[in-house]
Amino acid sequence: MNASVAMSGRERAALWDRLRPGLSGDDAELTARVIWSVLAEPGDGIAGQMIADLGAAPALRLVLRRNAFATAAALRAEATAIARAVAQAYDEQGREPLPGVRAGFLRWHPRMTGTLIETVFAMAAASRCTLLTPADQHWPPGMSDLNDHAPLVLWCLGDPALLAEFSHAVALVGTRASTGYGTHVATELAAGLADRDWTVVSGGAYGIDAAAHRAALAAKGRTVAVMAGGLNSFYPRGNSELLARVARDGAVVAEVPFGTPPTPFRFLARNRLIAAMASATVVVEAGRRSGSINTANHCGELGRPLGAVPGPITSPTSGGCHYLLREQPAQLVTSVEDVVELASGREGPAPEPLADPDDPRYGRVITALSATRARRLSDVAARCGLSETEAATLLGVLLLDGTVRSGDAGWVSVPRRE
């Protein structure tokens, strides 16, 4: 393993001491996980399953070939041989062979040659990051739900303890091209969550993400930004100052190694981390084809609560939210109380009734109704001794309170829930 990173054991040990302050771990496994994060794209299920089944270091020893092959045929032959070796390792453990190893090696090999691995380690040595693995205390607990598609390591700038606050974390996501309405709602929700001691998770992008991070910081709350590229530079560059503040007062995290550029497919892979890191996700404002819909889909696959904020029906930037409310199991979100209720799985405090409790006419109207038999307005008015206009006004207020219900057949009372 030493030759693979051009470092002595002492140099690697010193690197881990600095990148993992106060954390212990197997040096070979740490080294192998970092190398695997260089070789495999985020969410590579074959790499993830091999590491889970065999361990990062043993799996890497089976597949790592730093040499270039003279011909494509020679590379394919080596891929076949490696697949057989991995199958044998599985057989020795009494496991069924893992399909896809040959194709996996052909994906990983271009990154094995050259100096890419050494460059990542050199950039890590010059960074201010903390390196986390699934065995660490601050590893986000929700990542385990991603199974073989979970990240292999996480690089963190800032406070890694924030990553472990799954039960009190909410993801606020949305379009980069946010309107004034969307920005206002994201700001209100993030500030309200921060005031209630919830961590706000988002993706650091323009628009809704940036509004959520800024509001959480302004409220002296906690916020985490999940990046699609390496932490050697922030993207988008226009948010560099904001993300530097998040790194100082919160946490900025990435699964990809240093020097990895953010690309469209890496943004999509990053979205699964946002969904996994929070106990609920709320889409504040998003078009039908927004990447936030991808985050919402990951949320649904993980079985996490999903919320969406409605917007004007004439606004394309709310079309995605309306789609989620119509076609997906998303709950309507209009306030921070709705978000807390969604994320905590409990109902919030009952709203104050609109009906004046000191006005006896409301009691007369309710008494005139039946829970099982609908009554016309004229019948209700006659039973309680009021004009139809007056009775209609009182019924309208009770309808908003949820005390009565209206249908084609007339009005009925709604039994009070204990």
Image (tube, rainbow, N blue to C red):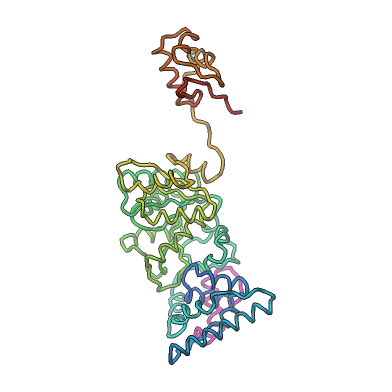
**Is the C terminus in the top left, top right, bottom left or bottom right quadrant?**
top right
Query: Residue 210, position in %: x, y?
Result: 36, 54
Query: Residue 274, position in %: x, y?
Result: 47, 57
* Residue furthest out toward the front: 409
- Residue drawn at 45 percent across, 72 percent down: 257
Q: Quadrant of residue 101?
A: bottom right
* Residue furthest out toward the bottom: 70
Q: Is residue 177 magenta?
A: no
Residue 64, compared with residue 363, is above or below; it is below
- Residue drawn at 59 percent across, 83 percent down: 84
Compare residues 109 and 200 and report the one nearer the observer: 109
Compare residues 288 and 127 and report the one nearer the observer: 288
Q: Is residue 25 magenta?
A: yes
Per the picture, the main secondary structure of the magenta-coloured stretch is helix
Query: Residue 319, position in %: x, y?
Result: 35, 47
Residues shaded magenta: 1-28
- Residue drawn at 50 percent across, 83 percent down: 5
